Image (cartoon, rainbow, N blue to C red):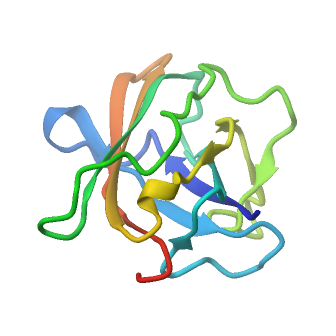
Amino acid sequence: MTTYIWELGIDMDALVGPANASYLPAAFVQPGEPALVKRPVVLSDEQIIFRIFDVTKNNHQGITIQSFTINPRPAIQGQLNVGPLNLQPTIPPDPSSNSPHESTYFSTHSQPTFPYWESQPVTVLPVATDKRFLLNFFVQVLGTTDGPRTFVHDPEMVVGPFG
């Protein structure tokens, strides 16, 4: 069984759009591999850990995660609307007590590590094996100086060998 990491980055310096929302950059990673997975194909019983990094460069502040929500929907017209994951992942409100972590997607020579939050693993359900899903991510945070902000990302996740 393979466990993947879905890296997401919140940036309190990012532009704020309608409804006080900002773009949430993201990348799908297979641990131990230096390159990103360009088109995720995830099979039944494989796991995904969601790791959220604070990639803010200039305006560091205390950030608390208020909620992390994944809204799956069918990516193919006529496909049954079934949930692809065994549960909605939970993210603790405060960053991991571990030291900052490297990111395959966000790390640079000038900033190799970031504060982060991490979910428990979620498992891809057998019912999702031959289907495609769009997963919409919503992260709501509370910054000590900027107040509440929502970060949003709408990637496509391919589940099953027919992606």
- Asked if residue 140 can be seen in this view, the reply is yes
Q: Residue furthest front?
A: 127
* Residue sitting nearer the eye, 99 or 155: 155
Name the quadrant containing residue 131. bottom left
Q: Position of residue 153 (x, y in %)?
A: 34, 53
Up-down: is 82 above or below 32? above
The structure residue drawn at horizontal position 51% and vertical position 74%, both measured from the top left corner, is 40
The spot of residue 24 in percent (x, y) is: 40, 51
Decide which of 144, 38 is in the foreground and name it. 38
Q: As drawn, is 85 to the left or to the right of 138? A: right
Instruction: Examine the image and state in which quarter residue 132 appears.
Output: bottom left
Q: Is residue 25 left or right of residue 99?
A: left
Can residue 51 be seen here? The reply is: no
Q: Residue at x 68, y 36 (%)?
A: 120
> Which residue is at the front of the view, 31 or 100?
31
Say how many tags the image has.
Answer: 0
In the figure, 13 relative to 153: above or below?
above
